[in-house]
Amino acid sequence: MTRPTPDATTAADAEAHAALDRRDQEEAARLFPGARYRDVLGWLHEAVQPSWYLEIGVGGGHSLARTLPQTSCIAVDPAARLEAEPPSKVFLAETTSDAFFASGVAERILSGARIDLCFLDGMHTYDQTLRDLINAAPLLSPEAPVILHDVLPLNDRVGNRERLSRFWTGDVWKIVPILQRYQPDLEMVFVPAAPSGLIVLRRVGAATMTVADRFEEAVAWADDLRFGAAFSDAIWRLPRCANTRDAVMAAFSGSVDPSQ
Ligand SMILES: C[S@@+](CC[C@H](N)C(=O)[O-])C[C@H]1O[C@@H](n2cnc3c(N)ncnc32)[C@H](O)[C@@H]1O
């Protein structure tokens, strides 16, 4: 038997890796049938009718493109590469979320107004997502929903902190057990939208973010957690909103009072 040349081995490895990723995508589609997360995001815009929208993590601009024409948008990404047509009313901050929140530019742009809908989809680590949530909270109107992406990985490889696969959520999923432990008053709604689920947090702007005072402790507590069935089950046990337009409209319409 001839041994494969190093090149052939590399090509075969690459193919096997891609096939694994394909299997992950197929498994995600099987687990989360129906609408994908950007469709759900679009329906959330329809339901909430935000005057102001904040998005952390813009990428190609495909989620930003789901905003309504009348909504003013603040979008943050140090490496946005817009492929989709951007909304007409958008301020794009080409910087990290930490630098953006520290700069005070949001307060200047909003000049007294509040964010009515927020989507956190920046760096895919739980500590950064938690920091984004804590930093966004003071900018929100009391009823503003906050949407978290990539909360339910398929397995611990997809949900690993370091990227091991093309289809990858990072360890954002740890934010759910952290909030359950350190901020239990926040209501979480799970939307099983492909490919890795959304959590919608209700009334963050009305909450006292006590988790902020215990940030280091919470991050250290979650450090050792490894994704498995217990965490997956805990997400499926949360209050759930189906990933259909009707369900999203029923659950979130009128959730923001325009006079606030
Ligand atoms: C998955 S993409 C966003 C996809 C987009 N929201 C969508 O659904 O079409 C994640 C983005 O987060 C950005 N990102 C990474 N670190 C960040 C940080 N510290 N602050 C803000 N954005 C960050 C990346 O540049 C990347 O474009």
Image (spheres, grey):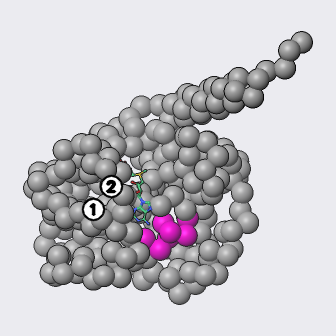
Disc assigned to residue 126? none
Q: What percent of the width, then of the height, locates residue 204?
A: 38, 72
Location of mark 1 (residue):
75
Label tally: 2
Q: Amino acid at mark 1?
A: Ala
Which of the 4 image quadrants contains residue 127?
Answer: bottom right
Residue 82: say if magenta: no
Which of the 4 image quadrants contains residue 39?
Answer: top left
User: Residue at left 55%, top 64%?
Assistant: 126
Measure the alpha-carbon separation of dots 2 and 1.
9 Å
Q: What percent of the width, then of the height, locates residue 224?
A: 73, 66
Residue 127: say if magenta: yes
Which of the 4 image quadrants contains residue 109?
Answer: bottom left
Magenta highlight range: 126-132
User: Residue at left 58%, top 76%?
Assistant: 182
Residue at disc 1, secondary structure: strand
Q: What percent of the width, then of the height, locates residue 118?
A: 32, 63
Q: Amino acid at mark 2?
A: Ala
On screen, residue 43 versus residue 129, left or right, reads left
Image-quarter location of ligand 1: bottom left
User: Residue at left 36%, top 63%?
Assistant: 78
Question: Majority secondary structure of the magenta segment?
Answer: helix
User: Does residue 179 appear anywhere in the picture?
Assistant: no
Residue at disc 2, secondary structure: loop
Label 1: how many Cα within 10 Å (few below 14, some 14–19, many 20+): many
Location of mark 2 (residue):
80
Label 2: how many Cα within 10 Å (few below 14, some 14–19, many 20+): some
Question: Do residues under tags 2 and 1 come within 8 Å of each other at their CB atoms?
Answer: yes
On screen, residue 85 versus residue 220, left or right, reads left
